[in-house]
Image (tube, rainbow, N blue to C red):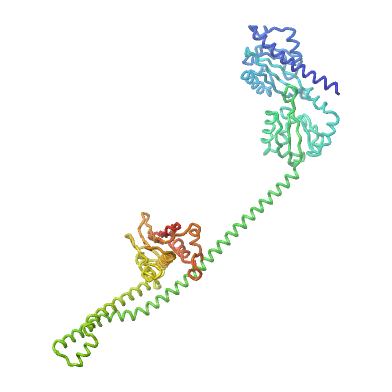
Amino acid sequence: MQKRNTKNISDRKLITIALADANHELATKFDNQIVTEPNSFPKTSQIQAIWQMLADMYFRIDPHGIILEYQSSKTYNLIKPSTIIPGKQLLECLPTSLVIRFHQAINQALQTQAVVSFAYSLDLGESKAQFEARLLPLESQEIIVLVRDITHIVQEAFIECGDNFRTIVENANNIIFSLTPDGLFSYVSSNWKDILGHEVAEVEGLHFAGFIHQEHLSTCVNYFTTVFTTGQQQEAIEYRVKHKNGNWQWHSCYLSAIKDATGNIIYFIGICHDITVRKQEELRRQRTEKALRKSEAKFRAKTQQLEETLRQLQQTQAQLIQSEKMSSLGQLVAGIAHEINNPVNFIYGNVKYANDYVQDLLHLIQLYQQYFYPPTPEIHQQIYAVDLDFIRQDLPKVLDSMNSGAERIRQIVLSLRNFSRVDEEGVKLTNIHEGIDNSLLLLQNRLKSQPESPEIEVIKEYGDLPQVMCNPGQMNQVFMNLLTNAIDALEEVAIPHPQIQIRTYLQADDRIVISITDNGPGINEKIRDRIFDPFFTTKAVGKGTGMGLSISYQIIVKKHRGELHCVSTAGAGTEFLISIPRLVE
């Protein structure tokens, strides 16, 4: 065995040296001699000897692939010697399966002016043979094509492994195989039958693609092509391969290229490992994880739905409580207003008559003084005691003050009745400005100057608004909440000139906009994002329920299909913008 290996190595070295010498010799000969006829190429004994050592078939072709010269030391049934004659296209004399590869090699040799070689296999009746084709470009643009039978080299590669290697291969748990450059199985280890069920004879000589699952075929072909092109071992790939019983099993495979002494790939060695159990576990785990993710998503969606339902219930409960409070308060206010209205109207209606009577009495006293003078000592003493002149001047002023007070009470009672709206249900055409003014009137006491804070100035910039279709009681509640919050904000800090600005205008899209702005301390971003949340308040315990802005938001957005926004920056005041359609269905 050792002698045979030494001999093969020596032969390969001689072949390599001879190939280099022949390439140089042939190029020199072709450059120095003008070829006038296909058969005029010199056939010296030296070139003849080199050719017999290098190749089994020899062609000299021109740039168009026309055969200029041909010789063969062997006869193959793939090419009939009688059909290969000078003047004929080389590609026409080749089997169909080789035409494309030879055509590409010819073009590559002409373009690169470098030696091009490749290996291929052919079916020679009952057996398969392995060949190597080498194309040597000449400066005269002609090409020398040398074809060599390397079947014995491929076969000897396995023989050289020895009995020890064969024993390892045959007893391995993995499938070990070899592929020709065409992708045909030239060898498979005997454990293929144990793993995939086929006899070795049923596999060898077939293309690997016939055993690969269709979904992974392109991956395997690309992997094979990459190894063939680069000659480098690639990362293992995973794919499904068919068992003889029709089942699909998962395999992991490495593929390595085996080259001859000149660096040409003559075959491939591969190792396959059955990973079906692991893949099944992975697939089972993936299905379990997918089911868990699906269940988790359903649970999360259900939780979100329950949270949303709970939030809506809380809001509904809060609104019901607030609505009940407002309803009770409205009824109470309406009742008080009604009870106050009667005596106030009685007083207001009789002040005028009382003023007239007083004027008549004062005039009568004046007549008495004019015609019965001097008065008796007792009358004179009484006039001095009551200061009749002061009474005559002050009594009309007292009556005017009583009249103004009665008028003020009457306006407050009217505002209470308008604010409560207990006699009105649902939506109706409403004067927005009237609702704002009523709210300001009820808050007049808080707007006035206090010992600890100056008077709050209210600046009205009312636009020319039409009547708006809305629920007036609910809108009044919104105005009251926003104005109260503005007053609270201005009372929190000492501001020299506290102001509340109220602007109204009609947008082009027929929407009413109400802006209520204060020059207070403003709201920071963290708090501003939560001001419309139910029960959220920044006020001290007992000073706020945290429902005013939440209910205002529900009234504007949910019930009037409008918008309520807060625009504020810490230290720069706060603006609440109400936008509602003029007509709400």
Drawn side of residue 417 relative to residue 399, left or right = right
Which picture quadrant has residue 350?
A: bottom left
Which picture quadrant has residue 578?
A: bottom left
Which picture quadrant has residue 100?
A: top right
Drawn side of residue 454 relative to residue 191, left or right = left
Q: Position of residue 152 (x, y in %)?
A: 79, 22
Using the image, determine if residue 268 lies above or below residue 544: above
Can the viewer see residue 474 in this picture? Answer: no
Using the image, determine if residue 370 lies above or below residue 416: below
Q: Position of residue 436 (x, y in %)?
A: 37, 66
Q: Position of residue 60 (x, y in %)?
A: 67, 13
Can the viewer see residue 81 in this picture? Answer: yes
Drawn side of residue 362 relative to residue 191, left or right = left
Nearer the observer, 573 or 63: 573
Nearer the observer, 171 or 221: 171
Nearer the observer, 114 or 301: 114
Drawn side of residue 401 relative to residue 283, left or right = left
Count the marks: 0
Nearer the observer, 379 or 580: 379
Residue occupying the point 64% across, 22% down: 104
Q: Position of residue 569 (x, y in %)?
A: 45, 56
Using the image, determine if residue 484 lies above or below residue 337: above
Quadrant where the C terminus sits is bottom left
Quadrant where the N terminus sits is top right
